[in-house]
Image: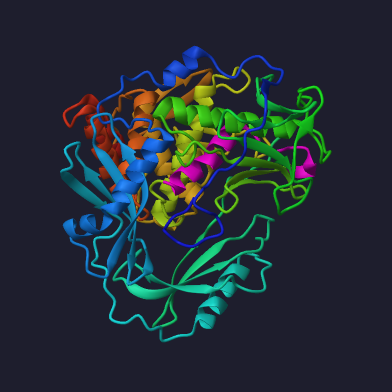
Amino acid sequence: MSPLPMRHKRSTLAIATAVAAGALLATGATTGTAAAQADATAAATPLAAPVQLSASARTSLLQERQAEAATTAQQIGLGAQERLVVKDVVKDADGTVHTRYERTYAGLPVLGGDLVVHTSKAGKAEGVTKATKAAIKVSSLTPKIAAGAAEKQALGAAKTLGSDKAAADGARKVIWAGSGTPVLAYETVVGGFQDDGTPNQLHVITDAATGKKLYEYQGVENATGTGKTLYSGTVSLTTNLSGSTYQLYDTTRGGHKTYNLARGTSGTGTLFTDADNVWGTGAASSSSTDQTAAADAAYGAQETWDFYKSTFGRNGIKNNGVGAYSRVHYGSAYVNAFWDDSCFCMTYGDGSSNTHPLTSLDVAGHEMSHGVTSNTAGLNYSGESGGLNEATSDIFGTGVEFFAGNASDAGDYLIGEKININGNGTPLRYMDKPSKDGGSADYWSSSVGTKDVHYSSGVANHFFYLLSEGSGAKTINGVSYNSPTYNGSTVTGIDRAKALQIWYKALTTYMTSTTKYAGARTATLNAASALYGSTSAEYKAVAAAWSAVNVN
């Protein structure tokens, strides 16, 4: 994810590729059932639901909003030295437009200065959602410490994570508004690798007057796990025929390609090709040329693309019709998978003994959803906002799994259940009662923000489960759940389809980079009100579900 409008190794998620002649289906039977897909879109489309814009319409609207940015800045009360830069735009069925902006001050990026302006069909401003309420103003634009000092501090922080980088990528001047009073600062990015082999992209924010470290966050998200069989049975894959050779290249979904890193840890790798258009064997292999992991990765990307398009009308991760790419066989015995903005790609390790690739369906959906968060709210990957970022990926990863309707990997509210990360068949995380994993929080408390983001995510995961299915004991697709509540209340679910719509609208129109749990409650209530009305059962259920996880 891309938490703030910062310079980072991960780009702004530009998914690219060309279209070659001929697209064919690989062997396989089912990628999902009509019933399962209907389940994800069961709710009638409310007037406040986002509509799918054509590429030309979206570009035109972005250009229009940028042309009006100076006027908009004046209308919402920004200072003379502040400028708005359009990042994204969402248009609802009723004509309401939500424009997401990043901000500059005296030409410097304002980290934590992002905001969303909500405008009616008639062009009337209906409100602004800001990452910070503080006025952006600093007394001086001249640093009192040298950039080198900031770089040295960032290198030290990165080395504590095991980074092998000997030099930082340079420090740039910014305005830090992510917390407290805005100040002149440096942002430094340190690359290399962490001690477990994960690429390192540590962003360190240093006060340019005092040299104090103000903030740091990791620019690469991952879901740690190890597994065994990670396959979804025999599936249909859209491939490309080039001459007499098939390529694992999906020209129908933005040009998604699947590459083989062959144990490497950098570069794009080699595009998977085949003579008979049958990919993999259905069994894990320690070979660095194994196609089975590639087939799983391609299937996960395919289902994730279709989920977002069918459920929300979102045309790719960046909503611009361009597809990401996937890399498999990363490193040697690398027990992880991660999304990286800088390559706009998904990367999968092969797990222990290079025989357990981390390519399950919900892992794919989870990781690629970090890209969606990066291009919408940009939830900061630390503290409570980091927990919301991780939970968003769990929520949408779960949505992908249910959407696919795959008999070999039926939808559930368990995260990473196929990868057997614990070695005993138990999942990585549980949405109905997050604390069952031994570390995640079931309910909010003042200490939640100090937890690792994969554990602080439990509060939002629990909220989503309660909103979808309700409290108490039940069995869904053969899996037993028993979800408790903080206040002993009984929560009645509104169904997963509506819960997904509410979370997506909250993420894309009402959350910002600094949103915490209290802000997430407000954002989802705003979303429920826009979609279903402020007196609706859905709105009341959102309030009840947050109270049930102690967010009031």
Between 552 and 181, the one lying in front of the other is 181
Residue that extends furthest to the right in the rendered view of this protein: 287
Q: Which residues are magenta?
A: 351-375
* Depicted 466 relative to depicted 266: above or below: above
Q: What secondary structure characterizes most of the magenta part?
A: helix
* Depicted 512 relative to depicted 428: above or below: below
**Residue drawn at 72 percent across, 53 percent down:** 265
Residue 538 spot, x, y in % from top left: 26, 27
Between 42 and 241, the one lying in front of the other is 241
Q: Is residue 3 visible?
A: yes
Q: Quick check: 197 left or right of 65?
A: right
Between 110 and 481, the one lying in front of the other is 110
Between 273 and 48, the one lying in front of the other is 273
* Residue 151 part of the magenta segment: no
Residue 277 spot, x, y in % from top left: 76, 23
Q: Quadrant of residue 382?
A: bottom left
Q: Quick check: 399 left or right of 291?
A: left
**Residue drawn at 66 percent across, 63 percent down:** 192
* Residue 370 part of the magenta segment: yes
Report the colour scheme: rainbow
- Quadrant position of the C terminus in the picture: top left
Residue 251 spot, x, y in % from top left: 61, 30
Q: Quick check: 261 left or right of 485?
A: right
Residue that extends furthest to the bottom in the rendered view of this protein: 144
Residue 84 spot, x, y in % from top left: 31, 59
